[in-house]
Image (tube, grey):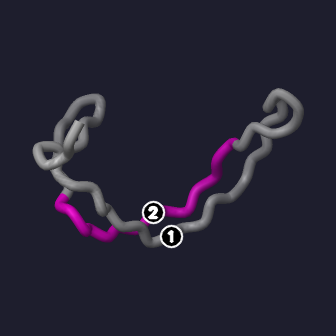
């Protein structure tokens, strides 16, 4: 189960999804003080997490 700020939804294990391409800020340099805009490519990702009830803590 995943919780967003205003909703709960369940993701089935072994679910594949597409991460969209987007622009993001990467902080670089000494002390990570310099922001650089970088393009992040789209990629196919997979959820391999067990449901919360099955995870051991």
Q: Give the residue displayed 44% in from the left and 72% down from the top.
A: 44
Residue 15 within the segment the image draws in magenta: yes
Confirm whether the magenta stretch covers residue 10: no
User: Is label 2 in contact with label 1 (beta carbons under 8 Å)?
Assistant: yes
Label 2: how many Cα within 10 Å (few below 14, some 14–19, many 20+): few
Q: Residue furthest right?
A: 30
What residue is rendered at 29% in x and 29% in y?
Answer: 5
Q: Which residue is mark 2?
A: 19
Could you tell me residue 49's position as x and y percent?
A: 27, 56
Q: Secondary structure at mark 1?
A: strand
User: Residue 46, percent across and down?
Assistant: 35, 67
Residue furthest front as drawn: 56
Q: In this view of the protein, which residue sits in the foreground, 31 or 20?
A: 31
Give the residue drawn at x 75%, y 37%: 27
Query: Percent x, y for residue 50?
Result: 21, 55
| C-alpha span from label 2 to label 1 | 5 Å
Q: Quadrant of the N terminus?
A: top left
Label 1: how many Cα within 10 Å (few below 14, some 14–19, many 20+)? few
**34 up-or-down from 14: above or below:** above
5 vs 34, left or right, is: left
The residue segment tinted magenta is 12-25
Which mark is drawn over residue 18? none
To which quarter of the image does residue 3 belong?
top left
Give the labeled residue for mark 1. 43
> Residue 6 or 33: which is nearer the viewer?
33
């Amino acid at each position: 189960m995943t919780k967003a700020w205003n909703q709960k939804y369940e993701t089935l294990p072994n679910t594949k999804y597409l991460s969209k391409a987007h622009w993001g800020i990467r902080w670089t340099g000494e002390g990570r003080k310099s922001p650089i805009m970088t393009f992040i490519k789209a990629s196919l990702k997979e959820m391999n997490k067990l449901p919360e009830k099955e995870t051991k803590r």
